[in-house]
Image (spheres, grey):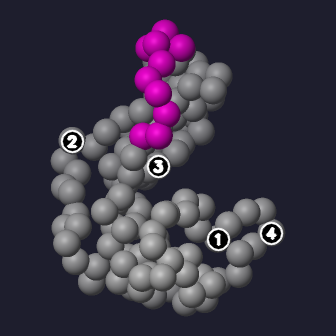
Amino acid sequence: MTVELCVSSCKSNGFRYAGLEYYGECFCGDSVNGPAAPETDCSYACTGNTSETCGGFDRVSIYQDPTFTQSDTTGTTDYMSLGCYSEGYNGRAVAFQQVVNASALTTEVCLQTCKSKNYPLAATEYSGE
């Protein structure tokens, strides 16, 4: 893995951030959810290019795409239904549950909530989650 390969993969899949950890594990995301660590903690050489840094032990080297354009958060027409999914065996089908008023929950409210937080997926279940 190299920095360029990870960044390119994340960018081509529509993600703002690319992160490399533990010699070259590549992660993509729309937000950074951990606290900053000293730059010296990211000292592991990338497996694909030893002159590049690919994180460290429990540390991620994060890169941001400066050409990323924020999507329009006012509409939800760019979401499309993917169908009905099982929760699966190793956790939730969609990982990040949002707090919304269950009695007022509609598909549109769910989509707006998830879109405002830059989540690429939105899901509802049990008529109120």
Residue topped by disc 2: 66
Please tell me whether residue 67 is drawn above or below residue 21 in the rendered image: below
Mark 3 or mark 4: whose residue is earlier in sequence: 3
Residue 17 x, y percent position in the rendering = 38, 44
Q: Magenta span covers which residues?
A: 32-41
The extreme front residue here reads: 103
Q: Is residue 39 magenta?
A: yes
The extreme top residue here reads: 40
Mark 1 or mark 3: whose residue is earlier in sequence: 3
Identified at 49% across, 63% down, the residue is 98
Mark 1 or mark 2: whose residue is earlier in sequence: 2
Quarter of the figure with residue 95: bottom right
**Amino acid under disc 4:** Tyr
Between marks 3 and 2, how big is the CA–CA gap? Answer: 15 Å
Residue 69 x, y percent position in the rendering = 19, 55
**Amino acid under disc 1:** Ala
**Amino acid under disc 2:** Pro
Instruction: State the mark number for residue 57.
Output: none
Please tell me whether residue 37 is drawn above or below residue 1 in the rendered image: above
Residue 122 x, y percent position in the rendering = 46, 73
Disc 4 versus disc 2: nearer the observer? 4
Between marks 3 and 4, how big is the CA–CA gap? Answer: 23 Å
